[in-house]
Image (cartoon, rainbow, N blue to C red):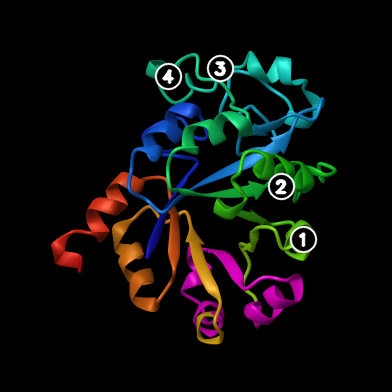
């Protein structure tokens, strides 16, 4: 079962910062997940929420802020004073970290609330320019954007869902993908086993407890997203769990 560091090593570093991504880049995990938004002047920045309030010393929506304003925010002190001065990174800066590694990058388009016109196209263009296309996976709760990406056939794509679906694999195929990224509760429902049986590639997000991870491994889940990749590597690869 593959392990992806969600927001970098976001359980032990401030999430979606260069510090968290650099730490994850030093781990033998399969990949990294990051979430992107567009500033008012259309710079691609890496942050989880639509608003900066939770993970910076600022307030407001990313979409309403110029990149110069976003760049002034402290994205580390909320986690620990040790990381005071960490900034919200650009997608290019994250690419810089993983340019010399073998990690796959799962970029989540956070377009399920605000549409961020052409965000998917801008990410794909930047990935191609930086030679990351063959290592990229695009996911979103906005399945219209996933369909747009899947139709281009330049990178892999996945639907994100927090809901319980009937025939989720058939739905994903209508969107244009066979990859489904579902919540931890959904993974223990029939929709997950049915999708796996039909040939879906299923990943589960926010898996932070090894006991759950081992259960998912037994079901046949292909991969997990975790805030604690260090812990998951140690637990899942220990001799007792082989």
Q: Are marks 1 and 2 in contact (CB under 8 Å)?
A: yes
Residue that carries the numbered disc 4 in the rendered image = 83
Q: Is mark 2 on a helix, strand or loop?
A: helix
In the rendered image, the vertical position of residue 212 relative to residue 42, given as above or below = below
- Disc 3/disc 4 C-alpha distance (Å): 9 Å
- Disc 1/disc 3 C-alpha distance (Å): 37 Å
- Tell me the crowding category of disc 2: few under 14, some 14 to 19, or many 20 or more residues within 10 angstroms, Cα based: many
Q: What is the quadrant of residue 45 in the picture? A: top right
Q: Position of residue 108 (x, y in %)?
A: 63, 49
Residue that carries the numbered disc 2 in the rendered image = 124
In the rendered image, the vertical position of residue 67 relative to residue 147, given as above or below = above
> From this viewpoint, is residue 11 visible?
no
Magenta stretch in the rendered image: 167-195
**Quadrant including the N terminus:** bottom left
The answer to whether 119 appears left or right of 95 in the picture is: right
Q: Which of marks 1 and 2 is nearer the N terminus?
A: 2
Chief secondary structure of the magenta span? Answer: helix
- Tell me the crowding category of disc 1: few under 14, some 14 to 19, or many 20 or more residues within 10 angstroms, Cα based: few
Q: Indicate whether residue 147 is drawn in magenta.
A: no
- Disc 1/disc 2 C-alpha distance (Å): 10 Å
In the rendered image, the vertical position of residue 166 relative to residue 207, given as above or below = below
Q: Do the residues labelled 3 and 4 touch (CB within 8 Å)?
A: no
Q: Which of marks 2 and 4 is nearer the N terminus?
A: 4
- Disc 1/disc 4 C-alpha distance (Å): 39 Å
Residue that carries the numbered disc 3 in the rendered image = 74
**Front position among marks 2 and 3:** 2
Residue that carries the numbered disc 1 in the rendered image = 152
């Amino acid at each position: 079962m593959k392990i992806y560091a969600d927001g970098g090593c976001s359980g032990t570093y401030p999430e979606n910062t260069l510090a968290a991504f650099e730490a994850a880049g030093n781990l033998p995990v399969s990949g990294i997940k990051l979430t992107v938004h567009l500033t008012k002047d259309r710079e691609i920045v890496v942050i989880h929420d639509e608003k900066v309030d939770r993970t910076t010393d600022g307030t407001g929506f990313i979409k309403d802020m110029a990149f110069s304003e976003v760049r002034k925010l402290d994205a580390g002190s909320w986690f620990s004073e040790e990381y005071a001065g960490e900034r919200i990174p650009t997608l290019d800066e994250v690419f810089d970290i993983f340019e010399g590694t073998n990690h796959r990058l799962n970029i989540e388009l956070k377009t399920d609330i605000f549409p961020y016109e052409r965000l998917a196209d801008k990410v794909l263009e930047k990935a191609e320019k930086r030679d990351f296309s063959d290592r990229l996976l695009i996911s979103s709760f906005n399945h219209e954007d996933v369909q747009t990406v899947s139709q281009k056939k330049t990178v892999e794509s996945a639907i994100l869902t927090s809901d319980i679906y009937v025939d989720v694999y058939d739905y994903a195929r209508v969107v244009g993908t066979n990859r489904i990224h579902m919540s931890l509760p959904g993974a223990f429902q029939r929709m997950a086993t049915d999708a796996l049986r039909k040939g879906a590639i299923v990943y589960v997000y926010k898996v932070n407890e090894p006991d759950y991870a081992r259960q998912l491994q037994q079901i046949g889940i292909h991969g997990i997203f975790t805030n604690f990749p260090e812990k998951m590597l140690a637990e899942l690869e220990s001799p007792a769990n082989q």
